[in-house]
Amino acid sequence: MTEQKVAVVTGASRGIGKAIAMELARRGALVIVNYNGSREKAEEVKAQIEAEGNKAEIRQCNVADFKACEEMFQEIISTYGRVDILVNNAGITRDGLLMKMSEEDFDAVVDTNLKGAFNCIRFASRQMLKQRSGRIISLSSVVGVYGNAGQANYAASKAGIIGLTKACAKELASRHITVNAIAPGFIETEMTEVLSEKVKETAKAQIPFGTFGQPEDIAKTAAFLASDDARYITGQVICVDGGM
Ligand SMILES: NC(=O)c1ccc[n+]([C@@H]2O[C@H](COP(=O)([O-])OP(=O)(O)OC[C@H]3O[C@@H](n4cnc5c(N)ncnc54)[C@H](OP(=O)(O)O)[C@@H]3O)[C@@H](O)[C@H]2O)c1
């Protein structure tokens, strides 16, 4: 049991999730660093958080697995007694043109990105309802707002996050649980590293700021939405995209 705020960040072994985990820990939360396959990286994130004098634990769970999510949240709640902040960050891409996209690639992306967020909200919000407070933040994308050729599966999952966010915000508001989404533009992580130079240049040309964003840009926004300062903001989608 802990008096400290408990934050669960899914997919926090690297990239944006790692930056969010580090920022929430700096602002006083005990952070649960969730990962699926990258155990060593998750352990490194925990070590980095502890090196800054803050608290973190790691938990393996495939967010696409409903039962596994239930078990993870049950265990977290029985260990720490609370869940104050949930950040649905875990996400994958399996890009391809519509005519060539397999059923498996569509399902994998929607199951991880959208159903994964539903699964975690489903079990975290049960505890937040008891606490009569909570912060839920999910990672959408500008692609979910505007669409993008070659990403029908990813765009559908990220647009779905927006609908999920708005519906849950309405359901949970009376218990002072806020539910918001962040729609990042192009952020420098392993997810965007794999794109070809040509794709990166085309993307950069669409960004009025002229540069890609950094994971910390998203982390600061998430930390604000998780803070008391954002207590009256719910059901919103905040684009953090350099003006796209
Ligand atoms: N980078 C961008 O430009 C950008 C733009 C818009 C939106 N976003 C969104 O922001 C989020 C983070 O992106 P990123 O660029 O930081 O990605 P990333 O570097 O590829 O990291 C993805 C993270 O998600 C985890 N993950 C993947 N599948 C999982 C599963 N089934 N269960 C639990 N964890 C899982 C990975 O952990 P394991 O390795 O352990 O599986 C990893 O920690 C994603 O939702 C992404 O769609 C990113």
Image (cartoon, rainbow, N blue to C red):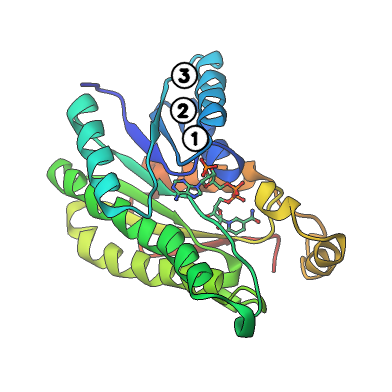
Pick whichever, 79 or 101, lies toward us: 101
Looking at the rendering, which quadrant does residue 34 occupy?
A: top left
Is label 3's Cβ within 8 Å of ligand 1? Answer: no
Residue 230 sits above or below residue 32 on the image: below
Q: Which residue is mark 1?
A: 21
Q: Where residue 220 appears, x then y in whole percent?
A: 56, 42
Q: Tell whether 10 sits left or right of 154.
A: left
Asked if the residue under mark 2 is in contact with the one under mark 3, i.e. CB atoms within 8 Å, the reply is yes
Q: Where residue 232 appears, x then y in whole percent?
A: 33, 55
Q: The residue tagged with tag 3: helix, strand or loop?
A: loop
Asked if the residue under mark 1 is in contact with the one under mark 2, i.e. CB atoms within 8 Å, the reply is yes
Q: Quote the CA–CA distance across marks 1 and 3.
A: 11 Å
Q: Which residue is mark 3?
A: 54
Three-letter amino acid code of the residue under disc 2: Ala
Residue shown at the point (63%, 44%) measured from the top left: 215
Three-letter amino acid code of the residue under disc 1: Ala
Q: Quote the CA–CA distance across marks 3 and 2.
A: 6 Å
Q: Where residue 120 appears, x then y in whole percent?
A: 31, 51
Q: The residue tagged with tag 2: helix, strand or loop?
A: helix
Pick whichever, 122 or 131, lies toward us: 122
Which quarter of the rendering shows the N terminus?
top left
Three-letter amino acid code of the residue under disc 3: Asn
Return the mark for residue 25.
2
Q: Earlier in the sequence, mark 3 or mark 2?
A: 2
Q: Where residue 230 appears, x then y in whole percent?
A: 40, 49
Q: The residue tagged with tag 1: helix, strand or loop?
A: helix
Residue shown at the point (44%, 58%) measured from the top left: 112
